[in-house]
């Protein structure tokens, strides 16, 4: 325990200050020194939030497809889950839990969506079929 | 601030290299969409009241407020389909 905290608690015990005053004083010392402003330089190891999902299809028939989908569509689409009636939502959650997916759509917050999107940067799907067709899905 | 897409670019090239392309300003779509919305407002209000009766947590005009971010999220959508042998391609870009 720091000296300052001890002093404040002693003053409270001696009745020199009220509990409210002691609380305010303790809050002041627990805030600590003023933090320097955050810089815009990313810390090493932090992931860049992906902005797009890329789907690239190359077939042996030379039919190629490139699709670039903005991930903002995912954010906007997830907002529509509020339209699902509560009973239907419960049914969905029950069915997902039965399949081993313990995920509750009711508890999904904006921070969870952002975390989900950030973790998509590690996602990459590569499919190579027997006849030489290739599909690649990734986020960047 | 929500920024709706400003233009859509479509290019279609057929076998042999013939084709066409154009760039349309998106306000050509937004203005009729807004007019359609104004016409449908009574139905939208009825639907919102029904949704509120079904789901007490439902906020009125949720679909309206969430439609704009959804349309704005279309910015950056890029679809490119092409065939190297026939030299045909279809490009759709929303920016």
Image (tube, rainbow, N blue to C red):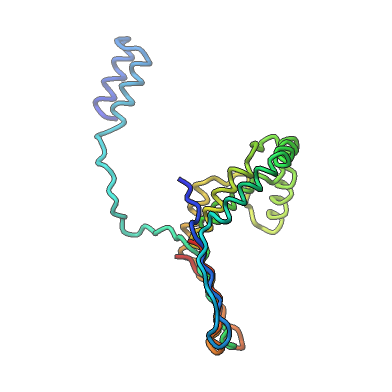
Q: Between residues B84 and A13, which one lies in front from this camera angle?
A: B84
Q: Give percent across and percent down for residue A71.
A: 51, 59
Number of callouts: 0
Residue at horizontal 53%, vertical 85%? B17
Residue at horizontal 72%, vertical 54%? A95
- Quarter holding residue A12: top left
Q: Between residues A118 and A23, which one lies in front from this camera angle?
A: A118
Q: Give percent across and percent down for residue B86.
A: 56, 88
Q: Between residues A133 and B60, which one lies in front from this camera angle?
A: B60
Q: Is residue B7 left or right of residue B52?
A: left
Quadrant showing the C terminus of chain A: bottom left
Q: Residue furthest top?
A: A15
- Quarter holding residue B51: top right
Q: Is residue A44 left or right of residue A47?
A: left
Q: Is residue A10 visible?
A: yes
Residue at horizontal 58%, vertical 82%? B14
Q: Give percent across and percent down for residue B49.
A: 73, 36
Residue at horizontal 48%, vertical 56%? B6
Q: Is residue A120 visible?
A: no
Q: Is residue B31 left or right of residue A34?
A: right
Quadrant showing the N terminus of chain A: top left
- Quarter holding residue A5: top left
Residue A94 lies, with reference to residue A132, above or below; the image says above
Residue A103 lies, with reference to residue B64, above or below; the image says below
């Amino acid at each position: 325990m720091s000296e300052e905290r001890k002093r404040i608690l002693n003053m409270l015990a001696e009745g020199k200050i009220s509990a409210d005053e002691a609380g305010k004083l303790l809050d002041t010392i627990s805030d600590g020194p003023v933090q320097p402003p955050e810089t815009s330089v990313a810390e090493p190891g932090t992931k860049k939030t992906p902005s797009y999902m890329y789907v690239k299809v190359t077939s042996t028939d030379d039919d190629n497809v490139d699709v670039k989908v903005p991930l903002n569509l995912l954010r906007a689409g997830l907002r529509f889950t509020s339209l699902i009636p509560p009973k239907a939502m419960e049914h969905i959650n029950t069915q997902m839990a039965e399949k081993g997916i313990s995920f509750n759509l009711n508890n999904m917050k904006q921070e969870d969506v952002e975390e989900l999107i950030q973790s998509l940067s590690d996602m990459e799907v590569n499919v190579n079929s027997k006849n030489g067709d290739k599909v690649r899905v990734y986020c960047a | 601030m929500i920024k709706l897409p400003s233009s859509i670019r479509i290019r279609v090239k057929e076998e042999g290299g013939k084709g066409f392309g154009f760039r349309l300003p998106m306000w050509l779509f937004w203005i009729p969409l807004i007019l359609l919305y104004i016409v449908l407002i009574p139905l939208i209000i009825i639907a919102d009241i029904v949704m509120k009766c079904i789901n007490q947590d439902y906020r009125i005009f949720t679909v309206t407020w969430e439609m704009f971010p959804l349309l704005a999220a279309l910015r950056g959508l890029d679809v490119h389909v092409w065939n190297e042998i026939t030299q045909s391609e279809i490009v759709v870009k929303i920016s």
